[in-house]
Image (tube, rainbow, N blue to C red):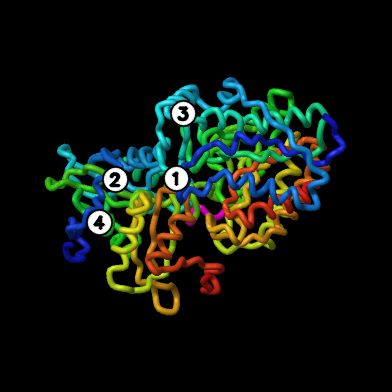
Amino acid sequence: MASCNRTVTRQVTATGKKMFVYYYMTPEPVTITSESTVSEATDIINRHGFRHLPVVDEQMVLQGMVTDRDLRSVCPSTILDPGERKNILARVSRSFVLDIMSKDFFQLQASATIDDALQLFTNHRIGTLPVVNRQQQVVGIFSLNDMMAAYQKLFGLGERGSMLIAIKDSGKEGILGVLAKGLDEQAIECSRLIRSPGRPGHEPAAIYLRVNTCNASLVHRVVEQAGLCLLSPKNPADGGNA
Amino acid sequence: MTSHKHITIVTDSSLLDHDTGGGDHPEVPARLTSIKEYLSASSVFSKIQYVTPDPATRGQITSFHTESWLFRFEESVLSGKTYIDHPDNQIGYESFELAMLSAGTGISAIDLLEQGETECVFCLTRPPGHHAEANMPLGFCFFNNCVIAARYWQSLGSQRVCIFDFDAHHGNGIQSAFEHETDTLYISIHEHPSFSYPGTGWAEEHGQGAGTGTILNLPVNPGTGDEQVIALLDGPVLELLESFKPEAFIIAAGFDGHGEDDMSGLAYSTNLYRNIGSRIKQWEKQFCPGHVVSLLEGGYALTALAPSVEAYLDGLS
């Protein structure tokens, strides 16, 4: 990522992980040129319910971002004299996007990972990021909702025909292999296997399995045979475990 | 047939022949035999009469399911397959016919009630049904017995049908059948979908379009016991029933929320099922006397299942 200079476009590229933004972004987003008027930008944002609009040149190369907040901030105050307000509104509407767009913004390369996006969203309180190719052309837009959908897909949350089994992590060496072998021997399809170290005093270390079966009894047996036990919080607020 | 008995159980010994392959499959014939044996030695036995069902007709099945699913199911059975789509959905040579018979238990039960032959009816049946979708089996279920029964009751004039589901798992097939409709209501208390099969039944799902407000999902966390369930029955469930005013109840009666049943992480006691039965009896009196049919769904720990069914019937009668 480039340095955090107010006048520099900051860019995030892939860090070698496989959870690419490209697969979860909204492709071919609506864009606007810097020569468009504020009135046109307002119309597009209102019509589509967007909060962010990439500003591009004729080759779709990203020039800036205009947000609903940018548009609101150039509107005259409602406490102004109505006549004066009307004049300012008319003048603002005729002004160009170039004058109000942000030239200091974050963007993602199409090869960036959703973890990269997560970093930007959480560290900079951003809601939407433009996605560009190597030529800096806009190829998509990636929002907080897209990120949640991506993680939902990756972890299989709410996947029909599956269930999540939470297991106390014994910390034993090779335990994941033992568990995977046990599931395999029983022909239980496991679509996700996650190991979480937990947080001392807050959350126990756990292994989470997402299995595609209704036969919980059989899965429980595999867990027991691996020398593990289930983690079933009776009341998460109390931190109590069954 | 006489009607001096209070409880009619619709079942057929041939339902035991639905072959789930033995081994580790929990949906076994012994589920039904253990219940029958337990009831025969219980205090409610004197109130019970047994009636055999007729199989559902193809037309009754297709009131919910697609023709293509029926063909696929029948073909799978005849070609000697041992499961459909997933090893959970084990089949034997007779499974298609027996699934038709299982769906027929609800229909026969409705006929008995409509003809005034009984006051209280429980379908002791397998394979279960509430996970079955219109075009696919899921979670041991092939035909959605509850939805098929609801469609039949509607065809007889009781339009406002409520399916109440207390199985530990969400009845995704029932929800998908009802979620766009205004005349039907689906209420389910189930283990939270983050932990439980089939990963559906989120609290914020209330129905879609015109059907908004006709789905009530009440997911509960692992470890949930009787008190919380009773609070739901006497609170949001009753409140919704009072506004919906059902003309008929179909109960998806699953007993796998019992603390001894490891198919869920719930911790219900046997006595909770007595309380659920008595609540349903009260609702029947309040909203639609003589219009309650219960169908067995889940319940796999045999030592807990039979006493739980007995307790439920005791509360219901």
Mark 1 vs mark 3: same chain?
A: no
**Subunit ID for the residue under disc 3:** B
Mark 4 vs mark 3: same chain?
A: no
Q: Image check: A239 left or right of B160?
A: left
Residue type at the position of mark 4? Phe
Q: Which mark is residue A161?
A: 1
Mark 2 vs mark 3: same chain?
A: no
Looking at the picture, tell me which residue is in the foreground, B56 or B306.
B306
Q: How far, Cα to Cα, is label 4 from label 1?
A: 42 Å
Mark earlier in primary sequence (4, 2): 2
**Subunit ID for the residue under disc 4:** A
State if disc 3 and disc 2 touch (CB < 8 Å).
Answer: no
Residue drawn at x 25%, y 53% as measured from the top left: A19
Q: Which mark is residue A105?
A: 4
User: Residue A24 placed where, x, y %?
Assistant: 30, 46
Which region shows up in magenta?
B191-195
Which residue carries the number 2 mark?
Answer: A25
- Label 2: state its secondary structure: loop
Looking at the picture, tell me which residue is in the foreground, A237 or B64.
B64
Q: How far, Cα to Cα, is label 2 from label 1?
A: 26 Å
Task: Specify the principal SS of the magenta part.
Answer: loop
**Subunit ID for the residue under disc 1:** A
On the question of residue A99 being in view, the answer is no
Q: Residues within 10 Å of mark 1 (few under 14, many from 20)?
A: some
Residue type at the position of mark 2? Met
Residue type at the position of mark 1? Gly
Residue drawn at x 68%, y 38% as measured from the top left: B123
Q: How far, Cα to Cα, is label 2 from label 3?
A: 39 Å
